[in-house]
Image: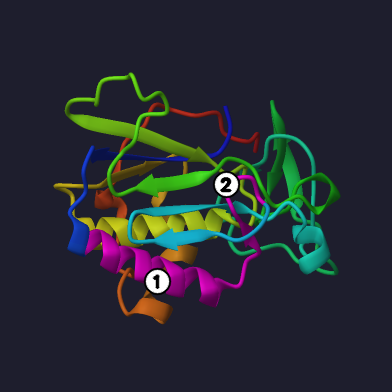
Amino acid sequence: MGYTHYWERPRILPRPQFIAAVEDCRRLCAALDIPLGDAHGEGRPLFKSTEICFNGHVDSGKLTSVQRTEGLVWPQRDAHGVAVIGEADAVVGGWHAGPAVRARVLGPNGDGSYETFCVQRVHREQHPQAQPPQGWLFNFCKTNYRPYDLCVQGCLIVLSHHLGSGNFRVSSDGSSSDWNDPRDACQHVLGYGVDWGEEKLAPVPPQPKPAE
């Protein structure tokens, strides 16, 4: 349970398109200037020809002036942006598992990390003895609507753009309007993405929504 984005892909992604996507993801995340770390939220994010892997930075509170809150966060309708300290309180209500917010927020103690976002060009099983999967693979990243959520969404748009629906399909707990921020960012930085619309978002099972 929690605000999550999903994607499906075959075990092996085409190398030229993946490398192009990696470079665009690197450019986009640099422009967004949201503190990112490695898979554990420390160190540096990974953008290489074989893999994209990052998390929000665990010490984001020391690096930014973003608001923070606790619990399982859910965006209210028309939520957008990143909530900065000194602005109006981002928490505007709640749902049964935590706060509903008007913008992305950090966790307790300024923790910007949550689940790792990782896309490998060639999927590797965690256990060497496991058989390579057949058909399409299902992956997801629960971001808890922390600021790095914007980087995750942006990278999913980039991967979808370069790989096409024949190799990469995206779905999300968020509605199409929840993707306006990353669409605009991709268009501004990379020159594409503004038309990445609702038809690209495959449906997912209904998720709990914050109370009105």
Give the percent coordinates (x, y) of residue 21: 31, 64
Using the rendered image of the protein, determine whether residue 65 is visible from the camera's viewpoint.
no
Q: Earlier in the sequence, mark 2 or mark 1?
A: 2
Tell me what residue is drawn at x 32 percent, y 68 percent. Answer: 193
Tell me which amino acid carries mark 1: Cys
Real-space Cα separation, disc 2 to disc 1, in angstroms? 23 Å
In the image: residue 73, left or right of residue 153: right
Tell me what residue is drawn at x 35 percent, y 59 percent. Answer: 157
Q: Which residue is mark 1?
A: 186
Give the percent coordinates (x, y) of residue 162: 23, 62
Tell me which amino acid carries mark 2: Ala
State the SS at label 2. loop
Q: Which residue is mark 2?
A: 39
Q: Quadrant of residue 90?
A: bottom right
First to last magenta residue range? 17-41
As drawn, the label of residue 122 is none
Is 183 placed above or below 75 here? Answer: below
Tell me what residue is drawn at x 17 percent, y 54 percent. Answer: 14
Q: How many marks?
A: 2
Residue 29 inside the magenta-drawn segment: yes
Few, some or many C-alpha atoms within 10 Å of disc 2 (few <14, some 14-19, many ≥20)? many
Q: Residue furthest left?
A: 166
98 and 18: which is toward the camera: 18
In the image: residue 198, left or right of residue 29: left
Q: Are marks 2 and 1 in contact (CB under 8 Å)?
A: no
Using the rendered image of the protein, determine whether residue 199 is visible from the camera's viewpoint.
yes
